[in-house]
Image (spheres, rainbow, N blue to C red):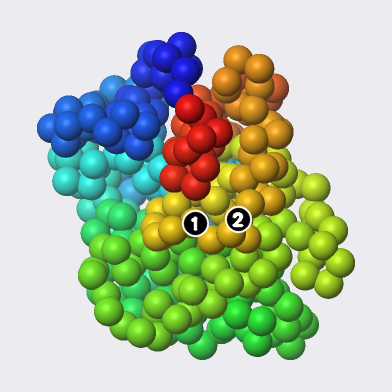
Amino acid sequence: MRDDVISWLLDGDPGVRWQVLRDLQDAPDDLVASERGRVATEGWGARLLAEQADDGYWGGQTYGTRRERDSVMWTLQILRDFGAPPEADPVRAAIDRVVAGVVWAEFDDLPYFSGEVEECVNGGVLANAAYFGVLGEGSDRIIARLLDEILPDGGWNCEPADESQRSSFDSTLCVIEGLLAYERATGSTDAALTTARRGGEEYLLERSLFRRKSTGELVKPRYTNFAFPTYWFYDVLRALDHFRRAGGHPDARLRPALDLVLEQRRDDGRWAAGSPWPGHRRYEVDAPEGEPSPWNTLRAMRVLRWADPAAIG
């Protein structure tokens, strides 16, 4: 693993640094925890927390129906990806404000952590709820819906079932991320949850994470675009990072996806920032498109360290 790349990553935001220490350097737990604690008080984590209004909202939006990316939904996702410590006072205060004030106005004012009706949205809400420790009646509602919405091919799709019985890569990944987060947070041994998650994972594995099952062709070019933040969008690196979190021995069917990640490595050992996903009022937390990306480099290196350690030395 190149020392110059590690040093470059460690010069970045606390949200990157603590994950480098944990995932790439096997640093002592106390050092990792100390660095992680800075996410709530320094850098982008502190900035995002400061952007919250007293009523609990970010950007005046729960989701962002006009692709606003500074809403509650996406700000919480970014704070989660940064690893903002849920127990830190600034984070806890922010979550308490969300619980007290944020609702889905389009869905009978359901509390934010109860989710709404689309599978991809509910998967993300469930992941946020599990991470920030807001579980209970709301998460139970989400899980019941998700288990009832599994399609015959094992995945999920935000399109109504009477319009499509074919799963979506985007929706499926959002859901299995949420289910895994819930299982980890609760220590759940519910076989139905694990079976559902593994069914969604199998849907992706059968397609090498980016290919059509029928022809082997690339499903959508955007699946090879590695952009951070990810929002609801599917990409191969995000999917690989999910499988890394799920753990276990890497499935051989991940090989084409790993090769695709390796193909995007620059000569300097870094990965470039992809094209930002559509939207406005974005938090520019990563490098500009085409420039070396700390987030893509971190995620790619830890995936490869898990699944193909020889590729990074």
Disc 2 and disc 1: Cα gap in Å? 7 Å
Horizontal and vertical percent for residue 210? 72, 56
Describe residue 189's horizontal placement relative to residue 34 as left or right: right
Label 1 secondary element: loop
Q: Residue at x 34, y 73 (%)?
A: 139
Which image quarter: residue 296?
Answer: top right
Residue bearing the label numbered 1:
250
Please say whether residue 280 is visible from this viewpoint: no
* Amino acid tagged 1: Pro
**Residue furthest toward the left?**
30
Please say if the residues under marks 2 and 1 sit with CB atoms less than 8 Å apart.
yes
Residue 302 shows which numbered tag?
Answer: none
Q: Residue at x 41, y 43 (%)?
A: 81
Describe residue 275's horizontal placement relative to residue 11 as left or right: right
- Around disc 2, counting alpha carbons within 10 Å, would you say few (fewer than 14), some (14 to 19), or many (20 or more)? many
Residue bearing the label numbered 2:
254
Describe residue 143's horizontal placement relative to residue 163 as left or right: left
Q: Residue at x 70, y 65 (%)?
A: 207
Horizontal and vertical percent for residue 91? 24, 42
Label 2 secondary element: helix
* Amino acid tagged 2: Leu
Q: How many marks?
A: 2
Q: Residue at x 24, y 69 (%)?
A: 186
Q: Is residue 145 above or below residue 82?
A: below
Q: Is residue 4 above or below residue 252?
A: above
Horizontal and vertical percent for residue 282? 57, 34
- Around disc 1, counting alpha carbons within 10 Å, would you say few (fewer than 14), some (14 to 19), or many (20 or more)? some
Location of the N terminus (image quadrant): top left
Please say whether residue 305 is visible from this viewpoint: yes
